[in-house]
Image (cartoon, helix red, strand yellow):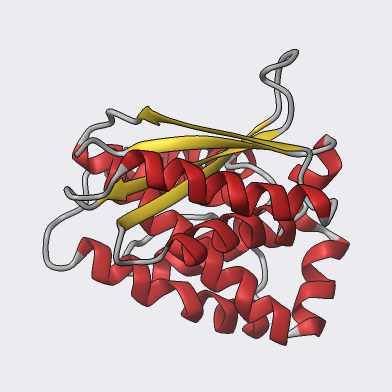
């Protein structure tokens, strides 16, 4: 059965851009629908444009072959009604649409979503780290993703002029909550550039900030590394 998705709308962009609210809503639906019906799942945030493209998340599910779609729609409607009455969402479009993406996209988005959930759940416990994050989300997030990638086996090159001091211990500790998820997803197979791009993009999208700062620092570092590598003795 093709991957399916439905749409959950928020009252405003502020609610959508919270770290916790979208992840909690995603988990509420997926946990309530149950793993007897769902093989895999993921979500993404969207907020640009006029209605019906106002602030919302797409919740995507890889349904088991024998799952009855009408029953799934009914269950989604019931969960959505509870969330609306609790003022946690604005509305829910329970229609199930196909999400026909390549396998590497599915894998990257599922992996990033699992990491986002682990990230949020660890921060629920580590309140001081959460306070550090919220004091400067952009700075925290790019350093966190560097720490995550390093722990998962990547070697992102960031020059000293950008990262002059070691990444804080609390950030590295938090990255450990996600790095094994990424390692297990990659396993022994060399990751493709397409997979890495989708993973990083989706992780930022599901949490806070965006990948633009990280990419600019990687690009600048790469330029200086390329220049240094071009040196030859005369």
94 relative to 170, above or below: above
201 or 84: nearer the eye?
A: 84
The residue sitting at 29% across, 66% down in the picture is 36
Q: How many marks?
A: 0
Across and down, in percent, residue 190 comes to 15, 55
- On screen, residue 215 versus residue 128, left or right, reads left
Across and down, in percent, residue 37 comes to 31, 58
79 or 186: nearer the eye?
A: 79
The residue sitting at 29% across, 37% down in the picture is 194
- On screen, residue 88 versus residue 135, left or right, reads left
10 or 102: nearer the eye?
A: 10
* Quarter holding residue 9: top right
149 relative to 50, above or below: below
- On screen, residue 90 versus residue 183, left or right, reads right
The residue sitting at 87% across, 63% down in the picture is 135
Across and down, in percent, residue 198 comes to 39, 41
Identify the image quadrant of the C terminus: top left
Q: Is residue 149 visible?
A: yes
18 or 184: nearer the eye?
A: 18
Identify the image quadrant of the N terminus: top left
The residue positioned farthest toward the top in the image shown: 50
The residue sitting at 70% across, 28% down in the picture is 47
Q: Is residue 225 visible?
A: no
Across and down, in percent, residue 6 comes to 50, 36
């Amino acid at each position: 059965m093709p991957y399916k998705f439905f749409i959950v709308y928020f009252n405003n962009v502020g609610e959508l851009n919270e770290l916790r609210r979208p992840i909690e809503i995603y988990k509420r639906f997926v946990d309530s629908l149950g793993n007897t019906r769902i093989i895999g799942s993921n979500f993404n945030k969207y907020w640009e444009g006029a209605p019906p493209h106002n602030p919302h998340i797409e919740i995507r599910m890889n349904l088991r072959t024998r799952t009855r779609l009408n029953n799934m729609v009914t269950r989604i409607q019931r969960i959505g009604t509870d969330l609306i009455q609790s003022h946690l969402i604005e509305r829910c479009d329970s229609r199930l649409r196909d999400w026909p993406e390549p396998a590497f996209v599915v894998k990257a988005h599922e992996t990033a979503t699992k990491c986002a959930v682990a990230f949020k759940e660890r921060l629920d416990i580590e309140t001081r780290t959460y306070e550090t994050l919220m004091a400067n989300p952009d700075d925290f997030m790019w350093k966190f993703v560097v720490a995550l990638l390093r722990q998962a086996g990547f070697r992102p090159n960031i020059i000293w002029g950008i990262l002059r001091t070691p990444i804080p211990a609390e950030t590295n500790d938090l990255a450990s909550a996600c790095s094994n998820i990424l390692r297990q997803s990659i396993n022994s197979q060399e990751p493709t550039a397409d997979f890495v791009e989708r993973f990083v993009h989706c992780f930022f999208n599901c949490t806070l900030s965006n990948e633009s700062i990280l990419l600019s620092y990687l690009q600048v570092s790469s330029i200086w590394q390329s220049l240094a590598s071009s040196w030859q003795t005369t």
